[in-house]
Amino acid sequence: MNKDRHTPENHFQKIKSITRTENDSQVFSTDSPVNLMVNIRPNKSISPGKFKKDPFTPGGYLAHPNTIRAVRKEIFMAGEEFIDLEKIYVCESCHNKVDLQFWHFCPYCEASFPKNIEN
């Protein structure tokens, strides 16, 4: 596996490997992926790590520029609550909880994540 266990390719491989115990069939269909584009406009008045609905762009969001830089551009949605790929980490610098599946670095304080975080 790649050193960064939270890459899109590693998430995809994990999703493909999740099976139902009763018949060993795949839980998620990976044959027909759906690509969605989300418009996120920078706005420095939004707190880092937060998103707010954009009043001028239907389906769009506003976010602090640092939040936009921190968010992973390719996100795999596995289930409604994303728990299959969830990896909660408490930032050592600012002590905020973040889910590593969504971020390249801490969206609140911009601290890098340690390289040795286990999956």
Image: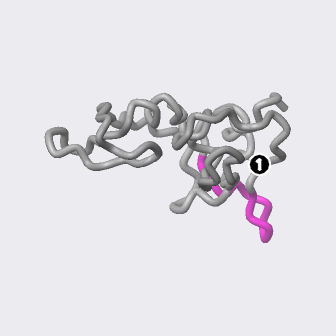
Measured as percent of width and height from the top left, residue 55 is found at: 16, 45
| Residue 38 in which image quadrant | top left
Asked if 95 appears above or below 43 in the picture, the reply is below
Q: Which residue is mark 1?
A: 17
Measured as percent of width and height from the top left, residue 99 is found at: 62, 51
Instruction: Give the class, few, some or many, for how many residues have Cα within 10 Å of label 1's Cα (few <14, many ≥20).
Output: some
Q: Residue furthest bottom?
A: 22
- In the picture, measured across the screen, residue 6 lies left or right of residue 21, that is left
Measured as percent of width and height from the top left, residue 51 is found at: 37, 47
Q: Residue at x 14, y 40 (%)?
A: 56
| First to last magenta residue range | 19-29
Measured as percent of width and height from the top left, residue 26 is found at: 70, 54
- In the picture, measured across the screen, residue 57 lies left or right of residue 68, that is left
Q: Disc 1 marks which amino acid? A: Ser
Q: Residue furthest front?
A: 93
- Residue toward you, 94 or 87: 94
Query: The N terminus lies in which quarter of the figure?
Result: top right
| Residue 76 in which image quadrant | top right
Asked if 65 appears above or below 34 in the picture, the reply is above
Instruction: Check if residue 21 falls in the magenta segment.
Output: yes
- Helix, strand or loop under label 1: helix
Count of numbered circles in the view: 1
- Residue toward you, 15 or 19: 15
Q: Main secondary structure of the magenta part?
A: loop
Q: Residue at x 68, y 53 (%)?
A: 90
